[in-house]
């Protein structure tokens, strides 16, 4: 007679156990590292995007000419400033791609990197991904970072503050969790 379901599940358990053991020996862990003190901060930067003119920061690389811009792809290298005015200090760039993913409205899926080029976070980046809907409001996830923001996570809430045919300015409220003094060097 065939083995009972009970004994076959034992067999699977044993198999899984030996597979895990094999995996553990195949990737030897040599040390652990420290994350340091967790910090949770909020700050605001302004996203300045220009569609038209000689200093445009966005180019449309795919234009499907479908309703609701479905299928279009834009690449942008927008300016991050401390304020909504064009004259406010530049603190970085927002570089990413806007994939027009909706047949019903002009929503986009946007992976982007916030590259800080001045101030406390100079040379650090945050990687953000999420959806921007028709309203121009978005609530997007910070999925990681580099530099000061190594091992960061969090959320970016954005809303437009002004827009015209030439461009748009949006406020980015950045809520980020990161760690002071990450030590990637081995500890005992
Ligand atoms: C945007 O700038 C590029 C060059 O950087 C130019 O080829 C393109 O025509 C411009 N687009 C608009 C809409 O001004
Ligand atoms: C484009 O940028 C250049 C160099 O930064 C600047 O001198 C010029 O005034 C800008 N043009 C417009 C239309 O903003
Ligand atoms: C796409 O092409 C259509 C038809 O040529 C044009 O009317 C429209 O402005 C273009 N859209 C973009 C975003 O360039």
Image (cartoon, rainbow, N blue to C red):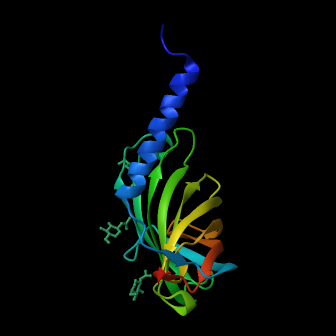
Residue that appears at 63% across and 84% down: 83
**Residue at 37% across, 44% down:** 64
Q: Nearer the viewer, residue 112 or 26?
A: 26
Q: Quadrant of residue 96?
A: bottom left
How many marks can you see?
0
Looking at the picture, does residue 5 appear above or below residue 76? above
- Residue 129 percent location from the top left of the image: 53, 60
Residue 87 horizontal side relative to residue 71, left or right: right
User: What x and y, as percent, mark residue 80?
Assistant: 53, 79
From the top left corner, tell me how far across and down residue 91 is, in percent. Answer: 52, 86
Identify the residue at image location x=43%, y=67%. 29
Residue at position x 54%, y 23% in the image: 7
User: Residue 186 location in percent, x, y?
Assistant: 46, 81
Residue lying at the far top of the rendered structure: 1
Note whether 126 is above or below 26 in the view shown. below
Residue 94 makes an appearance in the image: yes
């Amino acid at each position: 007679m065939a083995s009972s379901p009970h004994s076959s599940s034992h067999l699977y358990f044993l198999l899984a156990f030996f597979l895990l053991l094999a995996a553990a020996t195949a990737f030897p862990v040599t040390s652990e590292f420290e994350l340091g003190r967790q910090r949770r901060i909020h700050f605001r930067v302004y996203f300045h995007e220009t569609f038209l003119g000689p200093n445009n920061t966005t180019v449309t690389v795919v234009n499907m000419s479908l309703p609701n811009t479905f299928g279009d792809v834009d690449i942008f290298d927008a300016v991050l400033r401390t304020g909504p005015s064009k004259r406010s200090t530049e603190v970085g760039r927002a570089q990413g791609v806007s994939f027009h993913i909706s047949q019903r409205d002009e929503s986009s899926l946007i992976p982007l990197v916030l590259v800080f080029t001045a101030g406390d976070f100079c040379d650090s980046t945050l990687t953000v991904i999420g959806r921007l809907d028709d309203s121009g409001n978005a609530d997007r996830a910070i999925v990681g970072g580099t530099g000061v923001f190594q091992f960061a996570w969090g959320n970016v809430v954005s809303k437009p503050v002004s827009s015209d045919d030439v461009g748009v300015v949006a406020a980015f409220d950045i809520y980020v969790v990161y760690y002071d003094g990450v030590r990637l060097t081995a500890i005992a």
